[in-house]
Image (cartoon, rainbow, N blue to C red):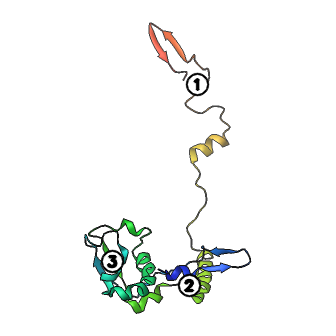
Amino acid sequence: MDIYSLYKQVRFDPDQNIYNLFQPTFIYNANVPLEEYEVTRDDEMRIDLIFMNMYQYDVSMLQYYLQDIDVVLFINNIDNPLNIKTGTILKYPNPEDFDRFRYNDDDLENLSSDVTKQLATPNLPNKATKVDPNRQAYLENDYSLPPVVLDVPREPVRIQDGRFSIGGL
């Protein structure tokens, strides 16, 4: 089975002799209407059967259509198809809308400019470090000891008036 996003979209970098796995392959398109499918006991942990039942494919056609299974997994935020349990509601698009969930080169160019615009927005929340006013006063007044420590320390363990005391504060 050839998964479309792996054999078509993942780019091979011949200079470094590696595949670029950091390039995004999916984009969520909220404008595409989605159908719902409830996983039955027979379908549990079987994404191939789930896919076949969602789209009413014949077994002979299934090999061709399974290449788009990655879109259904992406839409439902499933990283391991073996975790699909009975009763799970899965959302899925029409087969002609599969490509609307895939990045293309134009989307990648627009994505980089959108990110740049978002980071350059001056209305972002203030990330300045907050200053504790009590600590600031402590530092400015040059106190020698924190307020919980005595000027003259005591023994950590002592017997006083027939009582056993622990603590040097």
Residue 79 at x, y percent in the picture: 44, 69
Q: Nearer the viewer, mark 1 or mark 2?
A: 2
Amino acid, disc 3: Leu
- 143 and 75: which is toward the camera: 75
**Mark 3 or 2, nearer chain start:** 2
Identify the secondary structure beneath mark 1.
Answer: loop
Q: Mark 2 points at which residue?
A: 8
Report x, y in % for residue 153. 60, 20
Of labels 3 and 1, the one closer to you: 3
Q: Is residue 75 visible?
A: yes
C-alpha gap between disc 3 and disc 1: 74 Å
Amino acid under disc 2 = Lys
Q: Residue furthest front?
A: 60
The residue identified by callout 3 is 49
Q: Mark 1 points at which residue?
A: 150
Q: In this view, does 84 lie to the left or right of 127?
A: left
x and y percentages locating residue 60 in the rendered image: 36, 88
> Which residue sits furthest top?
162
Question: Which comes sooner in the sequence, label 1 or label 2?
Answer: 2
Q: Which amino acid does label 1 sit on?
A: Leu
Label 1 packing within 10 angstroms: few (<14), some (14-19), many (20+): few
10 Å crowding of disc 3: few (<14), some (14-19), many (20+): some
Q: In this view, does 103 lie to the left or right of 41?
A: right
**Is there any visible trace of residue 33 in the rendered image?**
no
Residue depicted at x 52% and y 21%: 167
Say how many tags the image has. 3
> Which of 95 and 34 lies nearest the eye of the viewer?
95
Q: How far apart are marks 1 and 2 (CA)?
A: 72 Å
SS at circle 2: helix
Q: Nearer the viewer, residue 136 or 66?
A: 66
